Image (tube, rainbow, N blue to C red):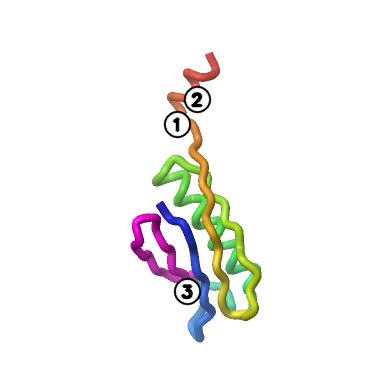
Amino acid sequence: MPKDIVLLATPPGWRHSLVTSDGGFVCGHLPGIPVEDAERAKERAAAMLSELGREFHGAVFEVVWEESTSPDSWTGHIHHSFEPQPAEADRLKG
């Protein structure tokens, strides 16, 4: 499970590194976002994590960004909660 995310502005664009709860790293980039647009990069990263949480973990991920003293790097802490799976949700309804 991812626990933190780091965003870095680089000349070709925004890079991200996810830190997992077991100490691993997953790195990638956010295509098409100019380095001047940190807010859009944070929004895209949070959306990416939201999809990851639903699709692979059956969980809701929320990113809480730390205040940054630099416009070219951000750290976010990932909080998660589990959603009932569709079959379980149906069972809970009735």
Q: Locate residue 20 relative to residue 36 in the image: left or right.
A: left
Magenta extent: 16-30
**Amino acid at circle 1:** Gln
Question: The residue tagged with tag 3: helix, strand or loop?
Answer: strand
Secondary structure mostly seen in the magenta stretch? strand
Q: Name the residue under label 2.
A: 89
Residues 70 and 35: in front is: 70
Vertical placement of residue 60 versus 22, above or below = above
Within-10-Å neighbours for mark 1: few <14, some 14–19, many 20+? few
Vertical placement of residue 47 versus 12, above or below = above
Residue at 48% in and 42% down: 59
Mark 1 vs 2: CB contact within 8 A: yes
Q: Does the magenta stretch include residue 27?
A: yes
Disc 3/disc 2 C-alpha distance (Å): 37 Å
Decide which of tag 3 and tag 2 comes sooner along the chain.
3
Q: Name the residue under label 1.
A: 85
Disc 1/disc 3 C-alpha distance (Å): 32 Å
Quarter holding residue 22: bottom left
Residues 32 and 66: in front is: 66
Residue at 50% in and 55% down: 49
Residue at 58% in and 80% down: 72
Q: Position of residue 46 (x, y in %)?
A: 56, 58
Residue at 61% in and 66% down: 66
**Amino acid at circle 3:** Arg
Task: Check residue 15 in the rendering and tell me which mark sits there, or answer none.
Answer: 3
